[in-house]
Amino acid sequence: MKRNRLIALVAVVALALTAVVVYAQVPTVKNYFARCSGTLPCDNVFNVGGTLQYRNRGTVTQVTSISTGVTVNATSGTITTVSQTIAAGAEAVFTVTNSAVAANDVVIVDVADTAAGAGGPFMVTVDNVAAGTFEVALTNTHSATAGNSVLKINFAVIKSGS
């Protein structure tokens, strides 16, 4: 009986020590950014209180129409659309030219601000990510109301490496 307890205790201690060693070898986000040498992605992203924040932020305002492309060369930012009139249930697509985007990157977007009376609600997605470009698709998910105002779309580029 004592021998079984001793074996169980030794197993628990060995397991705990293994967990400590493994935990000590896994870098935390904070430690990762502390080790950065100024190369991507470290020069554009930093850790503040456990949140990743981008330094390289850009803004651009679309002109002419909702399908007119924009250029913003930053790893994050805001795209302000023209006053759009996307029909209920319809979609509009525009191209974003961005030198910070590589073919293997992940681009995330969201509608940050919909002005009062904008119609919608709107769904925003990213398509066709390639080196230096991606497409934004805006879909008006309302069954009867067309869009009728300016939208602000936030974006962030997650660098995926090679």
Image (cartoon, grey):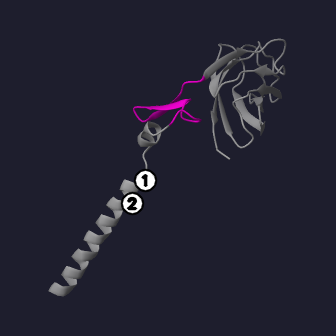
Q: Nearer the viewer, residue 37 or 104?
A: 37
Amino acid at dot 2: Val
Question: Would residue 103 appear left or right of 29 to someone viewing this image?
Answer: right
Residue 96 at x, y percent in the picture: 77, 26
What residue is shown with label 1? Answer: 26
Q: Quadrant of residue 121?
A: top right
The numbered dot on residue 22 is 2
Quarter of the image with the N terminus is: bottom left
Q: Residue at x 69, y 30 (%)?
A: 100
* Tag 1: amino acid: Val
Please identify the dominant SS of the magenta region.
loop
Residue 3: percent from left, percent from top: 18, 86
Q: Is residue 86 magenta?
A: no
Residue at 62% from the left image edge and 26% from the top image edge: 76
Residue 55 covered by magenta stretch: yes
Looking at the image, which is closer to me, 75 or 40?
A: 40
